[in-house]
C-alpha cells in the first residue's frame, strides 16, 4: 500500500511513477507519470535548499494528468479516466483521498494497463469548435506576500514549492486550450510586504498592479498574480480586471491561498486569469452554458473540489477576445528560461537535438531524458516537422501564413524542420493594390483600414482638421504616451498626421480590446459650415521587455505628405526610409514584390533573381511556394500559338495535295478584296525614270496578280534661266576681227533661253549653242629662223628694230 511519504520518496528517486488507483469496488486506474521539467524560478536571494524535481505529468490526447509530490502534506493531483476525473489529496499527510468528479456519473470505469496507454479523448466536443490551431504562450510571474511566507514557516523552499505547484496546475488547465503557461519569475517577500495588503480585494488589486508596473522593466511578464494568506471581505478569494491580458496597467490579479489543496488554489488563479482573458462568470449550466461537470473554471464560486473544464461560454468569450487583439503579447514563446540551459526546459539549446520540456515527450520523435532524436527520427520540433512521421514536411508547405497584405508567407523546403525567418514587403513599398499607402515592418499604413479595425464597419478616417489637435499633447490629440511617466507627447507641426489616429464613426465604443483596457475620447472640429467628430483611443500593450506601439497611434507607413510616410510618430521622406534597404533588380519584372532584404518574392510560375524566368515562385528567403514551375500566361500563349500553327499547316497541306487549292492565296484574295488593298502595297519610294521615256516595271503587286504598273516621269523641276544676250559684233578699238578666210565679220549667234514646255511628261530639245562651222584654227608660232628672216625683211615696215 502506497503512502504519501513513500510516494514523495519514490518521486525524488525516480523519473517515472507508475500508479494504480483502486476504488472501493475494486475498480482501478493505471497512470504512468513522467517527471515534468518546469522552468527554474529566479529568486531575489538564493535558496538555502535546492528545489527537487517533484512535478509529474501524463499527457493523453490533449489531456494532462498532473501530480505534485514534493512533501507529504502537499501531495495533490488531477487524474482523468475516460469520462470521469479525480482529485488526489491527502489527509494529515498520512492517507490518500481520491475524490471522484464525474462528468456523467460517479462510477469509476475499469481500465486495464493496456487501455491506460490509449485513453480516449475526454475533452468536451465543443472544445474543437473554438480551437484555431494556434498556440499562445503566457509568461507568468507569481508573487508571495509576507503572510504566505509566514504561513509556511518562513521557509522559502516551501513557498517556492507551493508557487511552482500552483503554476503547474494552472498550465494543466489551459493546456487543452492551446495556451501554455510558463512561470518566468517568482518574488517572495521575506522582509515584509512591499505595500499594505488590505482585506479589501479591490484596494489590494490596485496596489499590486501598481507594484507590477514598477517591476516590469526588470522582470517583464505577460501576466502577474499575487498569492496571499490574507482573507478578503465577503469571502472573496480572487480579484482581477476583465479583458486586460497583455495590458501594462491591468494584466494581473490577486488570489487567496484558501485551501491546502494546491489544485483548488490553482483553479482560482486560472479563474482570475480567465477574467484577464475577457471571460465572464458562467451562468445557468444546462441552458445558457454547457459544462460537463458540476461546475467549470469560470463558475461564480468555488466548490469543494477544483474544476478541470471550461464551459462553452468561456470559450466563446476567449475566442472573441482573441479576435479583438487581447492576445497581442502571447504569440512568442519564452526565449530563454531562468537558471541556464538544460535538457528539459522546452527550448532546444546548443548540444541538444530536441527538447520537449519533459522526460516523456508527447510524441515519439524525441527522447526527453537525453534531448536526442529517437531512432529513424529526423526532427522533433519546428514548424516544418511532421510529428506523426518525425520527418520534415513536404516542400512548399506553408509554415507561416501571411498576416496581411504587406506580410509574405514562408514555406518549408522539404529538407529541414525549421521554418524560415519572417519576411515582409520592403519598407516604403506601396501596399499591393493601393495607390498612396505604404508597407512598413509587414503592416500596411492605412488610416481607413485602421479606423475600421478599431471602430467597426462605420469607422472611417477623420477630417484633416482633427489632426491639428495632435499638437495639444492631451488624450484627444498627441504624438505618444509614456506609460512610465503617464505623460502625453505633443506633435510638431510637421508630424501631426503621424500622431494619434483620428477617426469618424457612428459607434458608441470601439470594438478593439476590452472597455476596461481601452480608453476612448472624442472632440468636435468645425470646418466652414460643417462639424466633424474626431474619435481617438488609447491603450498600452506590453510584449516582453518592449512596449508594443499603441494601436491608437497612426500606423507606420501611412502617408503624411508628398512622398512622405510616418515612422515612429515622425513624418519622414520615403526616400530616407527606402535608401537604407537593398533594391531588387528590374522591379521583379512586375511578377513579384521586393522583400525586406532586397530579394524578389515571385508569383507562382516565375523565379530567378528578378522573376524573369520560369520558376517555382517564392524567394530564396521564404523558400519556393510551389512544387512545379506552373503554367504562366506567356507559356499558355506560346503553347496555343504553336498548336494553332501546327493545325493550320496541316490543313493547308491537306488542301494543297488533295484538292489542289492554295488556301493562303484564297485567304489573301478575300482579305484584299474586302479591304480594297489594290495598288497600295508599294512600300518604298522609287526614283523617277529618265526624261521622255516610259518605263514598265513589275511591282510587288504583280506577285498578287495585279499585272504591270506603268510609271511616267515626274515633272522636271524649273531651272534658273539667265537673260538673253543681244546680238553683237566683237570688235577692237582699231579694227574688226575678220574671218580667217574672208573679210566678213565673225558670225554672230543669238543667245536663246531654254524653251521649257509647261506640259508634263514632254520635253523640247533646245538647239545647240555650238557653231555649225568650226572656229578658225589658231596658227602655231613659226620657227625662230623664220621669225628672224621676217624681222629682217619687214622689220622696218612694222616699226620693229632689232639690235
Image (cartoon, grey):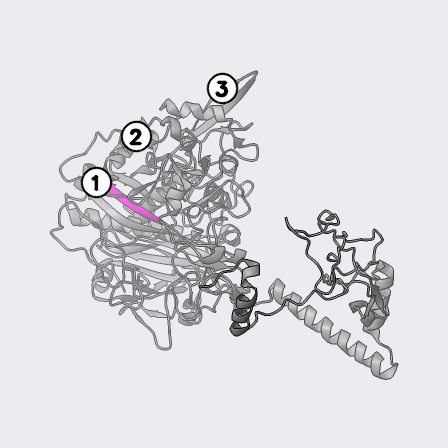
Query: How many numbered circles does the render carry?
Result: 3
Magenta residues: mostly which secondary structure?
Answer: strand
Q: Residue at coordinates 84% horizontally, 63% vertically from top-left?
A: 672
Occupied quadrant, residue 614? bottom right
Secondary structure found at label 1: helix
Which disc is residue 148 wearing? 1
Q: Judge from the rendering whether residue 436 lies leftward or rightward of residue 750; answer left or right.
A: left
Question: Which quadrant of the rendered structure holds the C terminus?
Answer: bottom left
- The Cα atoms of the two marked residues, 1 and 2, are separated by 19 Å
Of labels 1 and 2, earlier in sequence is 1
Residue lying at the far bottom of the rendered structure: 657
Circle 3 residues within 10 Å: few <14, some 14–19, many ≥20: few
Secondary structure found at label 2: helix
- Where is residue 632? Give x, y as percent: 60, 64
Residue with the mark numbered 3:
524
Residue lying at the far top of the rendered structure: 529
- Where is residue 639? Give x, y as percent: 66, 70
Residue 292 to residue 526: above or below: below
Whether residues under marks 1 and 2 lie with C-beta atoms below 8 angstroms apart, the answer is no
Q: Is residue 303 visible?
A: no
Q: Residue at coordinates 21% horizontally, 43% vertically from top-left?
A: 187
Question: Which quadrant of the rendered structure holds the N terminus?
Answer: bottom left
Q: Which residues are magenta?
A: 138-143
Circle 2 residues within 10 Å: few <14, some 14–19, many ≥20: some
Amino acid at each position: 500500500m502506497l503512502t504519501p511519504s513513500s510516494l514523495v520518496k519514490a518521486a525524488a528517486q525516480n523519473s517515472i511513477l507508475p500508479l494504480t488507483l483502486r476504488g472501493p469496488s475494486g475498480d482501478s486506474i493505471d497512470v504512468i507519470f513522467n517527471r515534468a521539467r518546469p522552468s527554474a524560478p529566479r529568486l531575489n536571494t538564493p535558496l538555502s535548499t535546492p528545489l527537487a524535481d517533484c512535478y509529474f505529468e501524463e499527457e493523453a490526447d490533449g489531456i494532462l494528468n498532473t501530480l505534485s509530490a514534493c512533501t507529504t502534506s502537499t501531495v495533490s493531483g488531477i487524474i482523468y479516466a475516460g469520462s470521469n476525473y479525480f482529485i488526489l489529496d491527502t489527509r494529515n499527510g498520512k492517507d490518500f483521498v481520491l475524490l471522484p468528479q464525474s462528468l456523467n456519473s460517479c462510477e469509476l470505469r475499469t481500465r486495464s494497463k493496456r487501455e491506460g496507454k490509449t485513453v480516449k479523448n475526454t475533452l468536451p466536443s465543443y472544445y474543437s469548435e473554438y480551437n484555431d490551431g494556434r498556440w499562445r504562450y503566457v509568461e507568468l510571474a507569481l508573487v508571495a506576500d509576507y503572510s504566505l511566507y509566514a504561513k509556511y514557516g518562513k521557509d522559502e523552499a516551501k513557498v517556492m514549492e507551493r508557487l511552482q505547484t500552483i503554476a503547474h496546475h494552472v498550465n494543466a488547465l489551459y493546456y487543452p486550450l492551446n495556451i501554455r503557461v510558463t512561470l518566468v519569475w517568482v518574488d517572495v517577500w521575506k522582509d515584509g510586504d512591499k505595500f499594505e495588503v488590505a482585506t479589501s480585494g479591490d484596494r489590494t488589486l490596485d496596489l499590486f498592479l501598481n507594484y507590477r508596473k514598477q517591476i516590469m522593466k526588470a522582470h517583464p511578464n505577460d501576466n502577474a498574480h499575487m498569492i496571499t494568506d490574507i482573507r478578503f471581505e465577503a469571502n472573496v478569494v480572487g480579484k482581477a480586471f476583465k479583458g486586460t491580458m497583455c495590458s501594462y496597467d491591468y494584466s494581473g490579479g490577486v488570489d487567496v491561498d484558501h485551501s491546502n489543496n494546491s489544485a483548488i488554489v490553482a483553479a482560482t488563479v486560472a479563474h482570475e486569469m480567465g477574467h484577464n482573458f475577457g471571460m465572464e462568470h458562467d451562468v445557468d449550466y444546462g441552458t445558457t452554458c454547457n459544462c460537463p461537470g458540476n461546475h467549470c473554471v469560470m463558475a461564480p464560486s468555488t466548490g469543494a473540489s477544483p474544476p478541470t473544464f471550461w464551459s462553452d461560454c468561456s470559450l466563446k468569450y476567449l475566442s472573441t477576445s482573441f479576435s479583438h487583439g487581447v492576445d497581442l503579447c502571447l504569440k512568442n514563446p519564452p526565449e530563454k528560461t531562468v537558471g541556464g540551459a538544460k535538457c528539459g526546459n522546452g527550448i532546444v539549446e546548443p548540444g541538444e537535438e530536441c527538447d520537449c520540456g519533459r522526460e516523456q515527450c508527447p510524441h515519439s520523435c524525441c527522447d526527453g531524458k537525453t534531448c536526442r532524436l529517437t531512432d529513424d527520427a529526423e526532427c522533433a520540433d519546428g514548424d516544418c516537422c511532421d510529428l506523426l512521421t518525425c520527418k520534415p514536411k513536404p516542400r512548399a508547405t506553408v509554415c507561416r501564413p501571411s498576416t496581411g497584405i504587406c506580410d509574405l508567407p514562408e514555406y518549408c523546403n522539404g529538407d529541414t524542420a525549421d521554418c524560415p525567418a519572417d519576411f515582409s514587403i520592403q519598407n516604403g513599398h506601396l501596399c499591393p493594390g493601393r495607390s498612396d499607402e505604404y508597407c512598413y515592418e509587414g503592416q500596411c499604413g492605412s488610416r481607413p483600414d485602421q479606423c475600421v479595425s478599431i471602430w467597426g464597419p462605420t469607422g472611417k478616417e477623420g477630417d484633416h482638421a482633427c489632426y491639428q489637435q495632435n499638437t495639444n499633447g492631451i488624450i484627444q490629440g498627441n504624438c505618444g504616451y509614456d506609460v512610465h511617466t503617464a505623460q502625453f507627447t505633443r506633435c510638431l507641426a510637421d508630424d501631426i498626421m503621424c500622431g494619434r489616429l483620428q477617426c469618424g464613426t457612428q459607434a458608441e465604443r470601439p470594438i478593439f480590446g476590452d472597455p476596461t483596457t481601452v480608453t476612448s475620447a472624442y472632440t468636435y472640429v468645425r470646418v466652414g459650415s460643417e462639424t466633424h467628430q474626431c474619435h481617438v483611443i488609447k491603450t498600452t500593450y506590453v510584449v516582453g521587455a518592449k512596449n508594443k506601439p499603441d494601436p491608437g497611434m497612426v500606423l507606420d507607413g501611412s502617408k503624411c505628405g508628398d512622398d512622405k510616410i510616418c515612422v515612429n510618430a515622425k513624418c519622414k521622406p520615403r526616400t530616407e526610409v527606402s535608401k537604407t534597404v537593398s533594391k531588387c533588380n528590374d522591379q521583379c519584372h512586375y511578377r513579384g514584390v521586393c522583400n525586406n532584404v532586397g530579394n524578389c518574392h515571385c508569383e507562382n510560375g516565375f523565379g530567378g533573381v528578378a522573376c524573369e524566368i520560369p520558376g517555382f515562385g517564392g524567394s530564396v528567403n521564404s523558400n519556393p511556394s510551389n512544387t512545379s514551375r506552373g503554367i504562366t500566361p506567356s507559356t499558355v500563349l506560346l503553347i496555343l500559338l504553336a498548336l494553332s500553327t501546327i493545325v493550320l499547316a496541316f490543313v493547308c497541306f491537306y488542301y494543297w495535295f488533295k484538292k489542289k487549292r492554295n488556301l493562303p492565296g484564297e485567304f489573301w484574295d478575300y482579305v484584299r478584296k474586302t479591304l480594297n488593298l489594290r495598288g497600295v502595297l508599294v512600300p518604298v519610294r522609287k526614283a523617277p525614270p529618265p526624261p521622255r521615256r516610259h518605263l514598265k516595271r513589275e511591282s510587288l503587286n504583280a506577285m498578287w496578280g495585279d499585272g504591270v504598273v506603268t510609271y511616267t516621269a515626274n515633272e522636271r523641276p524649273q531651272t534658273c534661266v539667265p537673260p538673253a544676250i543681244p546680238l553683237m559684233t566683237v570688235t577692237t578699238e582699231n579694227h574688226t576681227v575678220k574671218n580667217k578666210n574672208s573679210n566678213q565679220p565673225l558670225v554672230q549667234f543669238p543667245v536663246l533661253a531654254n524653251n521649257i514646255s509647261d506640259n508634263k511628261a514632254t520635253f523640247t530639245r533646245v538647239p545647240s549653242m555650238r557653231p555649225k562651222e568650226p572656229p578658225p584654227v589658231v596658227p602655231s608660232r613659226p620657227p625662230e629662223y623664220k621669225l628672224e628672216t621676217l624681222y629682217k625683211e619687214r622689220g622696218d615696215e612694222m616699226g620693229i628694230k632689232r639690235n
